[in-house]
Amino acid sequence: MIFYMCLTLLAAFVACQASEEIYQILAKDYYASKNLIISPFAIDTILSLVYMGAAGATATELQNYLKLSSEDKQLVTSKYNEVLDGLFQPRADGPTLKLANRIYVNDRFRLKEEYNQVVRDAFHADAQMFSVAGGVDPTESINKWVQEQTNGKILNLLEPDSLKPDVMAVLLNAIYFKGEWQSKFDASNTQEGNFWVTGQETVPVQMMSQTGYFKARYFTDLQAQVIELPYLNSNLSMFLFLPKERDGLRAMEQKISGFSRHMHCMEAVVKLPKFKIEYGEDLKGTLQKLGIRELFTDDSDLSGLLADKANGKISKFAHKAVLDVNEEGAEASAATYGMITNRSSFTMVLSFDHPFAFVIRDQRTIYFQGHVVSP
């Protein structure tokens, strides 16, 4: 999963904690009938990187969007120091969750040393120089770095020759996830089934199946069943949201923002299609709808970022993500239970044979969020 920000003379861009709002717009307006996956955490990270170099009204817009209660940027660095330090100490027998930040700077310009130090310490980002002089195209080496950070899942993020001489810097954020289910699906139980893409149309899918004890519940206000599928040796889980009605996805998604509710541990029959989804779009227009406007104009102030230019206009914000789910677990490039107690005698059947939503998260952070309308 990658974010790329191409500060063209001003620049390219960004996203955030309020990325839940981005998701709601995309899910409702643009991807109601398409598969969707984004990484709220990666969006938040790259936007915060930009905020650290912003000033004036530009910083205020970002502060409001990030829902920061204070202008004290030290609070932002403290937050990322804590979160990212945890990510860089993975368990050898647990999921792989890898975040990599890098800033590529045109060798005609310079990063402010203070900014460079902050992002190095707080965001674990490093800076590399690139050159477009003499007909050299730096996109090949940049794309190679992206490919390496995402285990080969994201290829050719930057188009050849897309970095023109007036591009000052490229900010990249790559997030990669691979985890095994705590309770794997037995491949011998996977059978061909039908998935309702509309109320009248089905497509064939490979439907996985297992019965086990999971945290699950039916929520009347959501008109949906929810189940948590934990990953092995981890506090990460995939939460799956199955609307009662085949056409109930849109209404349900408008109600599950920041989902954090109590669920019961019960026996459940889970039928889930194998799926792989990809997303790649420019989020500039969506961000403008959410109040990030000056950043995309000539009045943009990124004077804390680059030493040679006071301003920097965002020209593009590309977000690309991939998620692959199968019997073993999930792999994306965008919690275990101990002893099971308080089991319900009720067996819940969850058949994901029509559009559904999902998040991959731990107790405090949503790393991936999306929906499947056609596996």
Image (cartoon, rainbow, N blue to C red):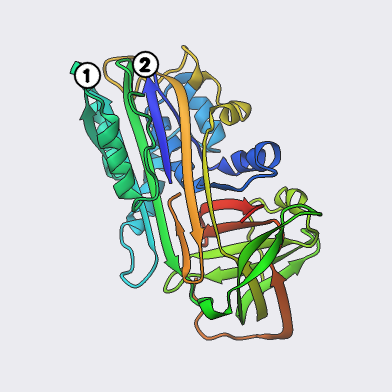
Residue at the spot of label 2? 9
Q: Which of the 4 image quadrants contains residue 12?
A: top left
Residue 356 relative to residue 46: left or right: right
Q: Residue at x 37, y 43 (%)?
A: 155
Residue 307 drawn at (x, y percent): 27, 19
Q: Residue at x 38, y 23 (%)?
A: 7
Rounded to the nearest angstrom, the CA distance separating label 1 from label 2 is 19 Å
Residue type at tag 1: Gly
User: Visible in this render: residue 352?
Assistant: no
Residue 40 drawn at (x, y percent): 52, 46
Label 2's element? loop
Circle number at residue 135: 1
Residue type at tag 2: Leu
- Nearest the camera: 172 or 307? 172
Residue 3 relative to residue 113: left or right: right
Q: Residue at x 63, y 60 (%)?
A: 260
Q: Which of the 4 image quadrants contains residue 53?
A: top left
Residue 2 relative to residue 39: left or right: left
Label 1's element? helix
Return the disc, 1 or 2, that comes first in the chain's sequence.
2
